[in-house]
Amino acid sequence: MERRLQQLFFALSILALVLIVAAAWQANTPSWKTYQHNFLQLEAQGEPNAVAKAAVLATPPEIHQVMLTGLQRVDRCTTCHLGVEDPTMKDAPEPFRYHANLGSHIPSKFGCTICHGGQGLATDKEAAHGKVAFWPNPLLSNDYIRASCGRCHKEGDVPGVPELTEGRRLFESQGCRGCHKLNGVGGSIGPDLTAEGANHRAPEWLEQHFLTPNAVSAGSAMPNFHFTREQARALTYYMLSLTSEEMGSYYSSVRVIPGPEYGRKLFEEKNCITCHNVGGVGAKTGPDLMGVTTRHSLEWLDEQLVNPELVYPGSSMPAYDLEPNARKALVAYLNSATPADIQLLLAHKNHPLTPEDVGIEAGKADFARFGCAGCHGTELQGGVPNPNAQGGEVPSLLHLSDDYTKDEVIAVIRNGRAPPLDNTAGPTPPLYMPSWKKVLSDEDINRLADFLWSKQEKKKESW
Ligand code: HEC
Ligand code: HEC
Ligand code: HEC
Ligand code: HEC
Ligand code: HEC
Ligand code: HEC
């Protein structure tokens, strides 16, 4: 009983202290009305006409609010940030400064918090900036704010944000999916990352975790990939962009920003060059695409990419399943493609693929896509620590043919396997070989085995 009273007394004195500090602090923090008053003074300064000046100064204070149903939020930031749309305020002090580079992301349609974070409804500064207890989503610092662009622009390149493209690429090539699910695809040894950006991890935490998982998450089974600081930053951007928010169709219509860089990537990926040439460089099955954007209208070209058969009956050109912005990106690339650039594209290509190569290539793609690389390494070298498994690490896949037949390997991939323990009294090793039969078709598994077989190294002769 006495102990209870002591605790109560202690709690009450803390509360009193908090209230005193809060009151003192509030007295020093101007309210939104003060900011509006100061803003009007600033505006009135440049006004030569006395009547107009008086009218500006007489504007009654009011809360400025943007309802963003498509983004499921209400933002009041412009109650204080009053000059964001006024270019004459480009040198004004904050919170009155003009916002450069908003482009089509105008405040009345986008508000502020979708990019910046913070608490949209709040009207005092600390709360609005989200630097208060129980508000999990504080303003992103300038180092990370451009990660938000990836919440809406999900594929292709976002102008000025190469980190997002690189982060996405690393995620797909390093085998993260071996342990993590993203949008339903992947393993479950690590947490699901579908909404990692809404998970309230500070950007700094994520970045440090990529540099040394163990430094922020003791005993983590996540391998140290020895990323550079730039790579860790790129992955952090990508993670922050994964919020799986519901957005209105207007906002999600721009998954891909149609630009020539992305178009070039598609042109390469879709192997358009195996039939076409540009100014004579490339193949001759299809027409020269040099100047094609001047010969046809944009609508015609778009239609041609959707359904070549409709435009040219009997066409041998495949119909590609490309979304509208991807088609625009391709056309943007065709508009600027030069023979010299095609030469560069062709320099990347090896010899034409045989059907066998095609199977191996597909196996290689599956190896990356399903995250095998996350545990076995991008070069199949193994070596990810796996405490108390025999050998202490995930095995290399470069010497399978010494110990197994191809069918045995197929069986391991299908059924999975827990590694034998080093010390039977010790803990279960964190990493095991998952069973893939529910995820991969037999055809996929066979192609994976073909790929692994193409990589086997001869056993070094020992003396
Ligand atoms: C009560 C007024 C007020 C409101 C409401 C407000 N801000 Fe601010 N904001 C300021 C002031 C004042 C500054 C200038 C820097 C300072 O004093 O901290 C500022 C600075 C900023 C900065 C510059 C970086 C920084 O932290 O200094 C950003 C970004 C920002 N605000 C975003 C927002 C967003 C987003 C919202 C809405 C969720 C918002 N603000 C709502 C007053 C406000
Ligand atoms: C489309 C995303 C986006 C939207 C929407 C957006 N901003 Fe920004 N904002 C940015 C980016 C990007 C920067 C630049 C950061 C930098 O300088 O690298 C920035 C910079 C700022 C800065 C200057 C920060 C500093 O320290 O220099 C302020 C203040 C700011 N924004 C406030 C707002 C307010 C208020 C709104 C809503 C009216 C808003 N922003 C809407 C993306 C956005
Ligand atoms: C809430 C979703 C959303 C976010 C966040 C967002 N955008 Fe956009 N973006 C759009 C939409 C929607 C359009 C198309 C606007 C239109 O045409 O009306 C667009 C258009 C663009 C365009 C095409 C050119 C233009 O300005 O119209 C570029 C470039 C662009 N965004 C870059 C960015 C960058 C950079 C960021 C981060 C600072 C960003 N976007 C953040 C939704 C978003
Ligand atoms: C979560 C980590 C993890 C992922 C993801 C993973 N593996 Fe494994 N794999 C292991 C471990 C651990 C072993 C060792 C099992 C043992 O010792 O019995 C193993 C064993 C194997 C073996 C047998 C090697 C040997 O020498 O015994 C093959 C083949 C294999 N994995 C292929 C794959 C393929 C293909 C994929 C992707 C479809 C994949 N693995 C994904 C962890 C993983
Ligand atoms: C299998 C061969 C083949 C591939 C692959 C192919 N095309 Fe074609 N394409 C053709 C042929 C053949 C034509 C000529 C008209 C026809 O018969 O359909 C054509 C016509 C075109 C035209 C109209 C040219 C004009 O001057 O009328 C465009 C544009 C075009 N292709 C773009 C592309 C793009 C972009 C890709 C890659 C995404 C691509 N093609 C992939 C065979 C191909
Ligand atoms: C061998 C399995 C494995 C691989 C491969 C792996 N992770 Fe992890 N990851 C984990 C485990 C286990 C955790 C939970 C422990 C921790 O926080 O480190 C984790 C945690 C994380 C977290 C923190 C989640 C949170 O908020 O708690 C992120 C983000 C993450 N991983 C991203 C990645 C990315 C990106 C890659 C690819 C570059 C990757 N992981 C590869 C096993 C793995």
Image: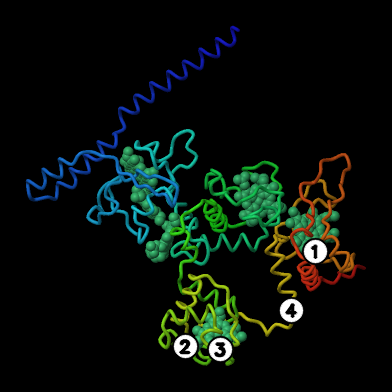
Is residue 104 depicted above or below 15 in this figure? below
Q: Position of residue 22 (x, y in %)?
A: 38, 26
Taking the spot 87% from the left edge, 50% from the top edge, the residue there is: 420
Answer with mark 4 or mark 2, whichever residue precedes in sequence. 2
> Real-space Cα distance between discs 1 and 3?
49 Å
Q: Amino acid at mark 3?
A: Pro
> Real-space Cα distance between discs 4 and 2?
31 Å
What is the crowding at mark 3: few (fewer than 14 residues within 10 Å), some, or many (at least 20)?
few
Per the image, the residue denoted by label 3 is 313
Residue 299 in sight: yes
Q: Identify the element where label 2 is drawn.
A: loop
Q: Amino acid at mark 1?
A: Leu
* Quadrant of res 19: top left
> Real-space Cα distance between discs 1 and 2?
46 Å
Q: Position of residue 306 (x, y in %)?
A: 53, 77
Q: Nearer the viewer, mark 1 or mark 2?
A: 2
Answer with mark 1 or mark 4, whichever residue precedes in sequence. 4
Q: Identify the element where label 4 is drawn.
A: helix
Q: Amino acid at mark 2?
A: Met
**Left or right of 111: which side holds 374?**
right
> Real-space Cα distance between discs 1 and 4?
19 Å
Per the image, the residue denoted by label 4 is 357
Q: Is mark 1 within 8 Å of ligand 4?
A: yes
Taking the spot 47% from the left edge, 62% from the top edge, the residue there is: 253
Per the image, the residue denoted by label 1 is 397
> Real-space Cα distance between discs 2 and 3?
22 Å
Q: Quadrant of the C terminus?
A: bottom right
Q: Is mark 2 within 8 Å of ligand 5?
A: no
Q: Position of residue 70 (x, y in %)?
A: 43, 52
